[in-house]
Image: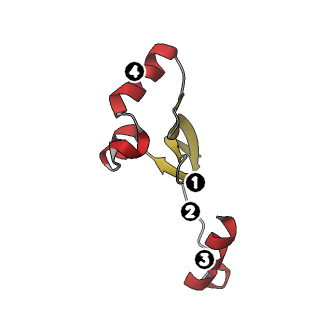
Amino acid sequence: MKTRNIIHIHLKEENRDLYYSSMTTFFDNIEKNKVGVVAQTVKNYMSVNKTNVFENDKIRIEKDIPLYLDSKPKKTPAKNMLTGNQLNAVSKFLS
């Protein structure tokens, strides 16, 4: 089974979780005022403090979260897949 490390980002003000393959990609796609910090500051903090977690009042970032990948994805029969309306209902229920 293959693994890949990802970055877990929690935006506190929006109570939203995001997942990225790199911090640089995340910071290239978000406004600084939403996170209150720049990528290099986070990287420096994690390096100096020998930690995989950075947190301030707007954001929490965890790096090196393992994502396990199947080498051969399993096909899902169409009868087991959710329709758009069902996905919306599940999304509203979970939020």
Decide which of tag 3 and tag 2 comes sooner along the chain: 2
Along the polypeptide, which appears first: circle 3 or circle 4? 4
SS for tag 2? loop
The image shows residue 35, relative to residue 49, as above or below, that is: below
Q: Is residue 25 above or below residue 86?
A: above
> Mark 3 sits on what residue?
87
Q: Residues within 10 Å of mark 4 (few under 14, many from 20)?
A: few
Amino acid on which disc 3 is placed: Leu
Callout 3: SS: helix
Q: Outermost residue toward the top? A: 48
Instruction: Using a 10 Å C-alpha cutoff, classify the residue at mark 3 as few (fewer than 14 neighbours), some (14 to 19) or many (20 or more).
Output: few
Q: Position of residue 83 (x, y in %)?
A: 59, 84
Which residue does the numbered mark 1 point to in the structure image?
A: 70
Quarter location, residue 77: bottom right
Between discs 2 and 4, the one toward the N terminus: 4
| Separation of marks 4 and 1 at Cα, in angstroms | 33 Å
Q: Which residue is mark 4?
A: 44
Q: Which residue is mark 2?
A: 73
Circle 1/circle 2 CB separation < 8 Å: yes
